[in-house]
Image: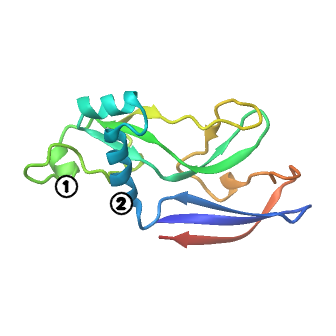
């Protein structure tokens, strides 16, 4: 499940909709992403990583990325890969007989002491060509205040929604 916010610029009245986290198709998205990684769609580095280590989890949720130089932002899917480092895999990961890897839908951000971030896709600012910062995973609506992309003025939140 995810949530979203709708904004309207206080000056030019342009409206924005921002989606965060993942929707009802989250498990399918994770499974498809891992299949694409294993096929090599995301490059040799990630394909090799998954061939060598079956204890990885992928987060492909929606987040806001913001440029620390110009303040520009975008709402995109992440591509964060985590390695399981916990000690009791059978009890912690809903383990089933015969499964040789962790389930695709494990959400590492929910158990940060059990996972280590080993890869994060870079999201680049189109204006400055620098890597953008991902806003915190534990965001509040105040954290999501982003400037208007058209005129740079503050946006006002006009509504919020929950999505599947």
Residue in the picture at 40% in, 56% down: 29
Q: Can residue 114 be seen here?
A: no
Q: Residue at x 89, y 52 (%)?
A: 151
In this picture, residue 113 sits left or right of residue 17: left
Whether residue 87 is visible, yes or no, is yes
| Coordinates of residue 113 in the picture (x, y in percent) | 35, 39
Mark 1–mark 2 CB contact (< 8 Å): no
Question: Which residue corresponds to mark 2?
Answer: 28
User: Which disc, if any, is residue 147?
Assistant: none
For marks 1 and 2, the one nearer the N-term is 2
- The foreground one among 137 and 103 is 103
Q: Residue at x 42, y 68 (%)?
A: 24
The correct choice, above or below, for 20 with respect to 77 in the image is below
Q: Is residue 135 left or right of residue 11?
A: left
Task: Give x and y (percent) for residue 145.
Answer: 73, 54
Would you place residue 8 above or below residue 52 in this image? below
Question: In the current view of this chain or complex, which residue is farthest to the left?
Answer: 97
Which type of secondary structure does the marked residue at label 1 adopt?
loop
Picture coordinates of residue 150, whole percent (x, y): 85, 53
Q: Are there few (<14), some (14-19), or many (20+) residues within 10 Å of tag 2?
A: few
Q: Position of residue 135 (x, y in %)?
A: 61, 45
Q: How is the image coloured?
A: rainbow
Query: Mark 1 sits on what residue?
Result: 94
Q: Nearer the viewer, mark 1 or mark 2?
A: 2
Looking at the image, residue 121 sits to the left or right of residue 74; the answer is left
Q: Secondary structure at mark 2?
A: helix
* x 33%, y 43%: residue: 57
Q: Residues within 10 Å of mark 1 (few under 14, many from 20)?
A: few
């Amino acid at each position: 499940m995810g949530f979203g916010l709708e904004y309207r610029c206080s000056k030019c009245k342009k409206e924005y909709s921002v989606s965060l986290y993942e929707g009802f198709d989250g498990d399918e998205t994770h499974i498809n992403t891992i299949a694409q990684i294993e096929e090599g769609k995301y490059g040799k580095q990630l394909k090799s990583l998954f061939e060598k280590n079956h204890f990885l989890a992928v987060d492909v949720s929606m987040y806001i990325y913001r440029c620390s130089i110009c303040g520009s932002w975008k709402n995109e899917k992440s591509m964060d890969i985590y390695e399981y480092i916990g000690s009791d895999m059978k009890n912690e990961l809903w383990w089933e007989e015969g499964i040789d890897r962790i389930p695709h839908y494990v959400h590492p951000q929910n158990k940060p002491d059990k996972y280590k971030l080993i890869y994060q896709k870079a999201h680049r600012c189109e204006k400055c060509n620098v890597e953008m910062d991902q806003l915190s995973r534990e965001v509040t609506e105040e954290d999501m205040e982003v400037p208007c992309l058209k005129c740079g003025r503050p946006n006002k939140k006009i509504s919020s929604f929950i999505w599947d």
